[in-house]
Amino acid sequence: MTVTVRFAPSPTGRIHIGNARTALFNWLFAQKHRGRFIQRFDDTDTLRSRQEYADSILYDLHWLGIFQDATEYQSRRIEAYDAAVERLKAAGVLYPCYETPEELDLRRKIRRTRGLPPVYGREALELTSAQVAEFESDGRRPHWRFLLPNFAGDPMEPQRTEIHWNDVVRGDETVDLASVSDPVLVREDGTYLYTLPSVVDDIDMAVTHVIRGDDHVTNTGVQIALFKALGSEPPAFGHHNLLTTISGEGLSKRTGALSIEGLREAGIEPMAVASLAVLIGTSESVQAVPTMADLVERFDPAATSKSAAKFDPDELLVLNRSLLHHMPFEQARDRLAALGIAGDRAEAFWNAVRGNLDRLSDATQWWAVVNEGPQEKPDLSAEDREFVDKALDLLPEEPWDGSIWRKWTGKVREESGRKGKALFMPLRLALTGLPSGPDLADLLPLLGREGTLARRP
Ligand code: GLU
């Protein structure tokens, strides 16, 4: 059987790094098992779902290096859900309810004061046909609940009913169906809540592994019962811990917190996002993993911890620097070219500056320094200016090779008697305008003799 997973966000906003964690867990799992990855949009909430969000989610996933084998929209599959509803009704496990939210709230409060679990008491099962007729003539429309199989003979007397599964992430899991309300599957207006369409899709699309956040653990108990009610074997399930900010707040698509778009615009590399999103909150150390193939190797869902994973966005910058520091030119070439960094010096330039970048786009500042000279007037004392002037007189003739910096500064040391910082800092300031930056031994050949002399203060 081909391993088949799906990533199923509702397209109601841009995805954030926490959603990316779910997408990556699924993608890496599929890669590890040479399986399929379905991109499914849970867009039955027509008021809040938008195609532009679906498009932006795909864009963000592709940027991260996740490519779907199929794309599905729940809004185009309503007929399949209607058919499932008919089957559940025929089996007597979907029943109409007429309570308003206020009535339900009141009932919950009463149950609590009586020491009963605050779940739905199935009062609608006892409605007489006269009561139903009255509701209908009052213009009330029913919502429909799934009768959970948590009773022996009488549904009004639920009993502890354990649903077990071996979670791909968390190991043995149990949900007691007596602790959960019969879920509403269809709203008064006939639209679907998430619970049923998800199960119907997972069946029809032959999903073998449902991997999602641990906020869905209880849902899984309910959905396993629903798979069985629809005559299907449930798939395997895995629930990963959720990401929170350092102060413990959850991330939300709607607030745009730490959106993938925002991180991309801030110059964070996709593999920095992927490395952090996957490795945080696991027993693996968080490191900059250079490629998705390497991340597949490292990924082990069972190494994920059960508690929420707090993360610090500053870690992304640390990973970013590390990735850029080791990034081969071939990988950076096209992006550098798009920034105007091209030509026969581009590779040597990249190798010289990559260790000094927070973001790849910062390379343009060094490209300007190399091509146009210092962008800021070097802050040199009169004495240092004179020193640099004399040092430039000692600059060897071309052709130059990789040892030119050593040769030149050796001569300057001999002639001037200066050494260490007193020797190097004025030269660095004169050549780049800045007190720190890439190795001058790497920069000097890029400037060439003419370019170096043009920097005479
Ligand atoms: N649309 C659901 C969510 O975003 C999908 C959950 C699932 O993967 O089944 O929470």
Image (cartoon, rainbow, N blue to C red):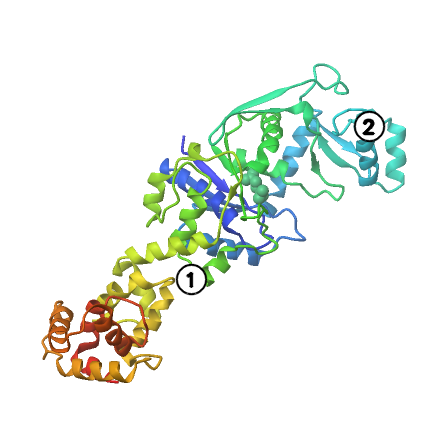
Whole-percent x, y for residue 225 in the image: 61, 26
Any part of residue 371 in sight = yes
State the quadrant of the N terminus.
top left
Q: Which residue is drawn at 65% across and 29% down?
A: 87
Residue 67 visible somewhere in the drawing: no
Please tell me how crowded label 2 is: few (under 14), some (14-19), or many (20+) other residues with Cα within 10 Å. few
> Which of these two is toward me, 185 or 414?
414
Name the residue type under label 2.
Thr
* 330 with respect to 240 (left or right): left
Element carrying mark 1? loop
**For residue 369, which quarter of the picture?**
bottom left
- Dividing the image into 4 quarters, which one contains the C terminus? bottom left
- Mark 1 nearby-residue class (10 Å; few <14, some 14–19, many ≥20): some
* Disc with the residue nearer the chain's start (2 vs 1): 2
Residue that badge 1 annotates? 267
The residue type indicated by label 1 comes to: Gly
Answer left or right for 41 relative to 277.
right
